[in-house]
Amino acid sequence: MTYHRSEIRTYFGFREATKQDVNLMTNWLCKHVLHHSHEFNHVEDKLYQQYRELKIVPPTPDRVERLIRSAIYSYEEQFFTTIYQRLSNQTFEGLDRLINQ
């Protein structure tokens, strides 16, 4: 059975996914998909489309879900960190006043 899958992959020019591919796909989602939408089905469709374009056999559906959730988390962390770094001291002081009231 494994031999047949290997033959089919080779015939169609696909290769198995690597750990590097997971990082590549996470970064790709953050840069090209997640700034437009976090809707899971949309992100999933775009991810599978990217795997097809790169001729990489996607991981199992469970791993795809984890990859997407990880990418969303990474995107949000980066987004909030960027906003936080842009806040002025005056804004911080105003927020502190609001919290302490």
Image (cartoon, rainbow, N blue to C red):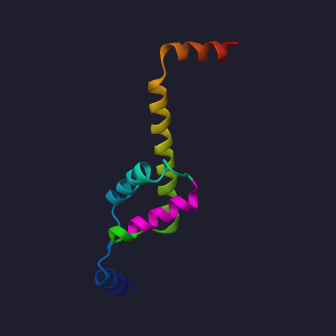
In the rendered structure, the answer to whether residue 20 lies left or right of residue 77 reads left
At x 54%, y 61%, the residue is 42
Q: Is residue 57 visible?
A: no
At x 47%, y 62%, the residue is 46
Is 59 in front, or is 83? 83
Q: Quadrant of the C terminus?
A: top right
For this orientation, the residue located farthest to the right is 101
The quarter holding residue 21 reads bottom left
Instruction: Please say if 90 is above or below 67.
Output: above
Magenta stretch bounds:
39-51
Is 56 in front, or is 36? 36
What x and y, as percent, mark residue 5?
A: 37, 83
Q: Is residue 56 magenta?
A: no
Dominant secondary structure, magenta: helix
Instruction: Please say if 62 is above or below 35.
Output: below
What x and y, as percent, mark residue 22?
A: 38, 58
At x 59%, y 14%, the residue is 94
What x and y, as percent, mark residue 14?
A: 32, 75
In the rendered structure, the answer to whether residue 60 lies left or right of residue 27 reads right
Q: Quadrant of the N terminus?
A: bottom left
At x 49%, y 50%, the residue is 34
What x and y, as percent, mark residue 43?
A: 51, 59
For this orientation, the residue located farthest to the front is 36
Is 90 in front, or is 63? 90
